Amino acid sequence: MSDLLERLRDRGWRLTAQRRVVAEVLNGDHVHLTADEVHERAGRLLPEISRATVYNTLGELVALGEVLEVSTDGRAKRYDPNARHRHHHLVCTNCRTIRDVPADETTDAPPSGDCFGFRISDVEITYRGLCPDCQAKA
Amino acid sequence: MSDLLERLRDRGWRLTAQRRVVAEVLNGDHVHLTADEVHERAGRLLPEISRATVYNTLGELVALGEVLEVSTDGRAKRYDPNARHRHHHLVCTNCRTIRDVPADETTDAPPSGDCFGFRISDVEITYRGLCPDCQAKA
DNA sequence: GCCAGTCTTAGAACTAGTCTAAGTATTGAG
DNA sequence: CTCAATACTTAGACTAGTTCTAAGACTGGC
Ligand SMILES: [Mn+2]
Ligand SMILES: [Mn+2]
Ligand SMILES: [Zn+2]
Ligand SMILES: [Zn+2]
């Protein structure tokens, strides 16, 4: 994620403390946090950060293509730093955990039948099921 | 959709004018209306119907498995009467039109790689691209 | 150090949806 | 047919998630 901060600076962005902590909080694998979760965690590193700045920064990162917006249900959008490797999502129907699974030619194939003349530019797959933990508890 | 009303009555449901118009409005192919759109159209048939009743009825139809909730973006959920044939969605990135494409063994295959121990029970695919109209205008 | 432009902020506003409490309609027992 | 029990509908209050606004704070270039 440190190279993310580099890239941002290269685009003429001010590297403020607020942007730094938002990027920091999004660091890692299988990270899919809501804006509120990002705000809460960023607030642990920089207590005075505002909700508006978190939304602004997330929006900017999305616009830059550095972070993806994921909405697997009708609830809060989740912010996903894994924008460099095309992937799909495994979602636990019980605890809502989300894991990344890599995309490939197989998963990204267009539908076999009639596409109604659409020019398809992206395929997004959500695999729903029970995660190992929730299987054990069931 | 008339057999839907039959099925509802069989489950001990009162066949009210409100439920009738909500079911009526959802009739058709490639229908993916928001709750507000359902309310607006239902209101043309039964002016005094309330938003709460529309939400209640839609929730009941979803619970019965007669209607699907679809959320392809972070916006309002859409209600889809095509619950009897498993299908996926083509979504226009420009005008947000949604079309149904049938699911089959190919599209519903689990991911090729590691599934992190998930027991997958459902696969949901969103194909994004430009619809024919929006291609023409571009 | 000054200033213009950029960034951050609190809070208002907005969208989508849920909840509540009171009123209305339907049903089935008598 | 009548009436109470129950199911259903309603307006509007409330909530969650998000965006907008207007004012103040910070930066970097001169
Ligand atoms: Mn992801
Ligand atoms: Mn559909
Ligand atoms: Zn789980
Ligand atoms: Zn279109």
Image: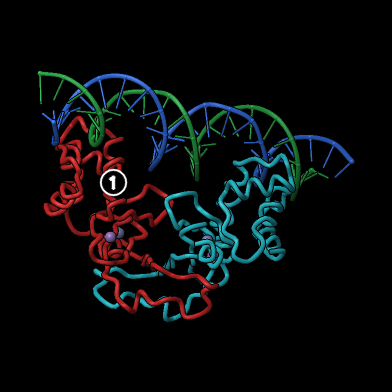
Chain colours: A red, B cyan, C green, D blue
Residue A137 in picture, x, y percent from top left: 29, 60
Q: Amino acid at mark 1?
A: Glu
Rate crowding at label 1 as few (under 14), some (14 to 19) or many (20 or more) other CA atoms within 10 Å.
some
Residue A113 in picture, x, y percent from top left: 51, 80
User: Pointer 1: what residue?
Assistant: A60
Which quadrant is the N terminus of chain B positioned in?
bottom right
Residue drawn at 68 percent across, 42 percent down? B49
Q: Quadrant of ligand 2?
A: bottom right
Host chain of mark 1: A
Q: Is residue C20 above or below residue B77?
A: above
Residue D23: quarter of image: top left
Residue A84 in picture, x, y percent from top left: 23, 63
Mark 1 near ligand 1 (CB under 8 Å)? Answer: no
Residue drawn at 33 percent across, 61 percent down? A91
Element on which disc 1 rests = helix
Q: In the image, is D3 to the left or to the right of A66? A: right
